[in-house]
Amino acid sequence: MALLLALYTYLLLIIEGNYKERQKLLIAIRNMADGASLLNNQRTMHEHKERSSNFPIITMAPFPIDGDRIEWQPPDCEPRQNFAFVKVHKAGSTTAQSIFLRYGYVHNLTVMLPGGKNPASFSWPNLPSPGDAYPVSGGVYNILTHHARYHPETLRARMPPDTIRLAIMRHPLDHLKSMFNFIHLNTKYNLDPMNPIQNFLENLTDYAEIDSKFYDGRSPTRNFQSFVLGFDQMKDFGDEQIEQQFRDRTTEVPFVMILEHLDESLVVLKRLMCWVLTDILYDWTARNYRRFYYKSSSLSQLAIDNHHKWSSIDYALYEHYNRTLWEEVRKGGKDFVLELEHFRMMNSKVNEHCRIDPKGSRSFPATKWNAAWAVDAQFCRQLRQERFIWDWKLSMRQNEKIRRERLNP
């Protein structure tokens, strides 16, 4: 009865979004029983709570029992370790970046690091330019994961021919709300404080001119995700040039993660890249998260229709990549469903351990989807490590390699 009451309280805390109290209750539940299997389907990243996709959410039994009975077999393919990740602002891209930086460091790969004034981006908001990256031995990079507008010529010049191109997106309307809050457009555009998004979208012509150059000389609200992916944000889907660019881009960038379905995206990514489960574990702490009162405000149909027209390229890309994600999920069948559930359970246990006992260790047995392994203090540190720490560690390692080569030509 005590366990049922605790679980009921936990569900209420999820609904309320009370993260700190939830973590305290987790410890109590763990002491009463092994509650991990009951917590599998809970997402703790706040961005994932509001799902705007029409695609179904996968739900299933709390524990993939069959996975425990089958011995793990290493993948029969070679890991793909050359990749360029288009880091779209305010789309969960910092969480994804932390996975990629950890992967690069653990596997001793060469990461392209910004060498300009902004340590987080390459020539933003312009396209990448010569000299905006720190030089490395051989002049070729394995990984790009910092902010940079998509530019095929740069990738061909700096990365191997087999480099796979990835990105992340979120529903355009949620992205607009996040951008509004991020740069405080509600006050800077002097909008109705009760529902600034609706005020803006219902009166776009009044704000079009100031909006077009507000954010680093670019619009922060119109086709912004498309802009990062290399499109002209001031045009509309339906323009002949844009539609040709759309066909090219969706061929060049075969897979884009969807924030609303991050776990599904990561399992598809794991299979695409021939990685292992530990490569895609991530910290549940939402990066760059901010609460704002109008996040869940309802909008009029006029506002919604205007946004579809205002950011038509964003919608076209999002709908395409969301559809292709679910096509991959369905191709995987039951095995994908079971692997997804196992991944969620494993990520839950690892996050729980790293918050309760970050300096300790916890062993996990081999299953169909992972070899036997143990999470330790080093892994816990790496799981939550910030981008600037990774940049420092990677630059020290890569600079040391250059130094050794100069000393021993």
Image: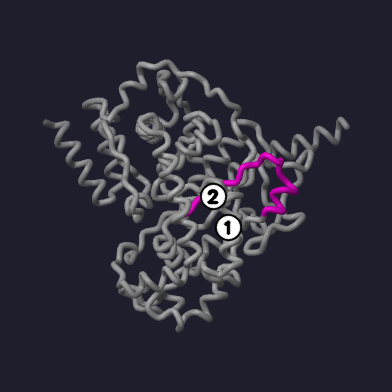
Dot 1 or dot 2, earlier in sequence: 2
Nearest to the observer: residue 315 or residue 357: 315
Magenta stretch holds residue 58: no
Q: Quadrant of the N terminus?
A: top left
Q: Position of residue 125 (x, y in %)?
A: 62, 64
Is residue 198 toward the left or the right of residue 84 in the image? left
Labels 1 and 2 touching (C-beta < 8 A): yes
Magenta residues (range):
152-169
**Residue 394, label in figure:** none
Q: Which residue matches tag 1?
A: 229
Dot 1: element: loop
Q: Position of residue 45 (x, y in %)?
A: 37, 47
Q: Quadrant of the C terminus?
A: top right
Q: Amino acid at mark 2?
A: Ala
Q: Position of residue 30 (x, y in %)?
A: 27, 29
Q: Which residue matches tag 2?
A: 167
Nearest to the observer: residue 177 or residue 354: 177
- Looking at the picture, the colour scheme in use is one colour
Give the Cα separation between the discs numbered 1 and 2: 8 Å
Is residue 170 toward the left or the right of residue 405 in the image? left
| Residue drawn at 62 percent across, 31 percent down | 107
Q: Amino acid at mark 1?
A: Leu
Nearest to the observer: residue 23 or residue 94: 94
Q: Is residue 126 above or below residue 60?
A: below
Residue 19 visible in image: yes
Q: Is residue 83 above or below residue 225?
A: above
Residue 352 visible in image: no
